Amino acid sequence: MAERVLMKGNEAIVRGAIAGGCRAFFGYPITPQNEIPECMSRLMPKAGGVFLQAESELAAISMVYGAAAAGVRTMTSSSSPGISLKQEGISYIAGAELPCVIANVQRGGPGLGNIAAAQSDYFQSTRGGGHGDYRTLVLAPWSVMECYTLTAEAFDIADEYRNPCLVLLDAVIGQMIEAIEIPDWKPKVPPKPWTTTGAKGRPANVVNSLYIIPSDLEEVNNRIQARYKHAAEHLTRAQSIRTEDADVVLVAYGCSARVCRSVVDMARGEGIRAGLLRPITLYPFPTREIDALAERGKRFLVVEMSSGQMVEDVRLAVEGKSEVRFYGRTGGVVPAPAEIVEQVKAMAKASSGSTTVNRQPTTVN
Amino acid sequence: MHQEVVMAGAGGDGIMMIGQLLAHAAVLEGKNIVWFPSYGPESRGGPADCTVILSTDEIGSPIASTPDVLIALNQMQLDKHAPTVRREGLILLNCSLAVPPKDRDDCRVISIPASEIAEKAGAVKATNMVMLGCYAAVAKPVTLESIIKALPEVLPAHRHNLLPVNELALQRGAEMGVG
Amino acid sequence: MQKVYERPESMADVQMSYCPGCLHGTVHRMIAEVIDELGVREQVVGVCPVGCAVFMYEYMSCDMIEAAHGRAPAVATGVKRVLPDSVVFTYQGDGDLAAIGTAEIIHAAARGERITTIFINNTTYGMTGGQMAPTTLLGQKSTTCPTGREAMREGFPIRVCELLATLDGPIYLARVAPVNAAGLVKTKNAIKKAFQKQLEGRGFSLVEVLCNCPTQLKVSPIDSLKWVEENMVPYYPLGEFVDR
């Protein structure tokens, strides 16, 4: 067994990024992600890369845009309010078909909200967030180990799809310490003939998201959408835990998936066959995996630290074939396993007597 | 083995440090751990607490909503966290600064004068170590040897002159636990 | 036969879409000439603004990036930091640089980024239809201050060179007005000096170019040049503000 080292989630993001070939980081302070720029400022220069604290999130993401145009693996990080500010640049990066990685350590919202863990940026993360017809590819780690590996991989994914890749975590995953085994990581860097590095021995390159002729812009949009279609086929990832014989399948990601992992064992301890489907990619969403479970008559309880965002994707996947219920806490409250066990019990009880499909969300705040 | 412990004191008490020390000791023993801090907008002072979950199995929830163990260094933190401890759990308190809760007869409550013990051991700052040593002896999440072995990893290099006093404080605490 | 005038290598062989009499094309050409004269075309990465010069990337034959409105100095920072041997310039108008991009230009200057900014001040948002700019003069009419800019209503115009001159990061700050023969020569010289300063690698350089907008001023090209001289130069004095 490789040596296990203790590491904070936010630090694992940094070490994973450097292992993934990131050589330029541009950030701005905001809690609860401050360990990322702080750790970057120590480690990035040692890796021969650039660390720069920008004057704002707007500037930071534009610096990322510049570094990405220059062909360097680059990233920024922030927490919810700061990610809102970065949307301008993220849209430009998507439009200019540039790769980059963004880490969002989600906190409570809306507005200034608070600094506790939340998952209320799911829509913003998976629907694009900024203006225009684009998406960010979204990876959702649920452990410190995955903070490392998924961030490292995010750079390969961003390069492959020439699209921003978002690592979506929350204050709990970012702040917690776990033991991890540092993997050997070899970045896969494709050739980048489109970079603006000085037109030496080749025609000049332009990095741009402006296409004034509508049919030209439509062509760009089609190209971008084709990449998302490819991603849906090849990138989608989810983890199934004890879903095989489950009557109730919990669907959760990140911190709430960790809580649901406890719920599965607790419910089974009380004689209820519960399982967990954990989306690892939130966009592309594991629609097919959920649909397959729905086809087999599984019923779903979606648990989020939001008032119900991912549940919409689950409903789209289930298409009315089975029951989908929702349980959420908001404002930075992490649901306790016992609360969710009660929901699972109620669901199991309802199924034994009634076949009514409840399509209304059950929100408990 | 699965144990969820909340450690609570004031900023400067070394709460985060004993949490991390326990985490390092658990890693030495090949156990799974999660350490999670509470953190506020204030940079200094105020309450400080952290959660450590140790397990020989995969750890689900990183938040201990009904912890098995509470280690409380002062009255305010004891009052705040004592009601969350699970039934038949363990409450370990520093009776130099707190009086035992009246309404937790369902828990095992251990009161030790940790501040005085630490002072006698050579440094009142090592109160946190007395509490950790006692907890290790009572609940046996890890061995005292593992904690002592992990001490140099957690104590910053320029504080290694304090290794002996911390070790002594851990041992004095442990003696309270077995005694 | 001796060739006395030709298209610079750094300039693309395309027709520009600027209005008749506009100085943008003239300043583009000067930048291209300077790049050629310094022999750095293959190291250049230019960053265009949002505004009239948004299509500048089509007119240059060096690598170019189109930035979001006002963010060109941040984009240029990203490029220069990862490619320290490149020659990076931004080309920005007054709305781009002195309104929406104020933070970016001030901080790029304060950090002493080794980049060069060519700042076109024509007191108006030309492309969007002649709205009030941060540099619109007091009393000057625009489509969003139709009775003329009033200090107590719209505030005062911003003097960018003077503002940036308070910082330690810039090593060259100059204001020029290519509205007559002498002004054209001085403009070219200032642009060249600004690029040379970048090559020295000691800090930030900026040239503010007072320009005309005959379309929004609704006057002839010749009269628009006179307008710059008579109205802008008194408020925006010409000269070198920092040279170190």
Image: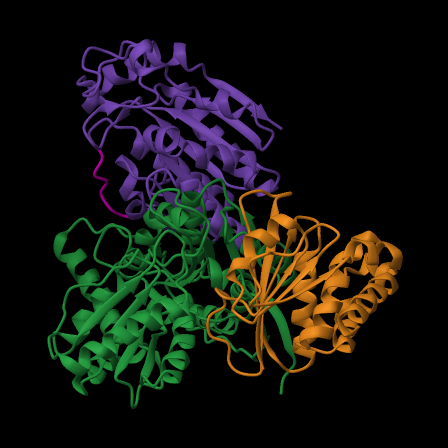
Chain colours: A green, B orange, C purple
* Quadrant of the rendering where the N terminus of chain C is positioned: top left
**Is B96 on the left-hand or right-hand side of A157?**
right
Is C15 magenta? The answer is: yes
Q: Where is residue C204 shown, x and y percent of the image?
A: 54, 36
Image position of C140 with respect to A275: above or below: above
- The magenta segment: C13-18
| A4 and C162: which is toward the camera | A4
Residue A136: percent from the left, percent from the top?
31, 62
At 71% across and 56% down in the image, what residue appears? B94
For residue A104, which quarter of the picture?
A: bottom left
* Horizontal and vertical percent position of residue C173: 52, 27
Q: Which is nearer the eye, C121 or A152? A: A152
In the picture shown, does residue C23 fall above or below A42? above
Q: On the rendered structure, is A95 left or right of A54?
A: left
Residue A140 visible from this viewpoint: no
Q: Dividing the image into 4 quarters, which one contains the C terminus of chain C?
A: top right
Whether residue B112 is in magenta: the answer is: no
Q: Is residue C138 visible?
A: yes
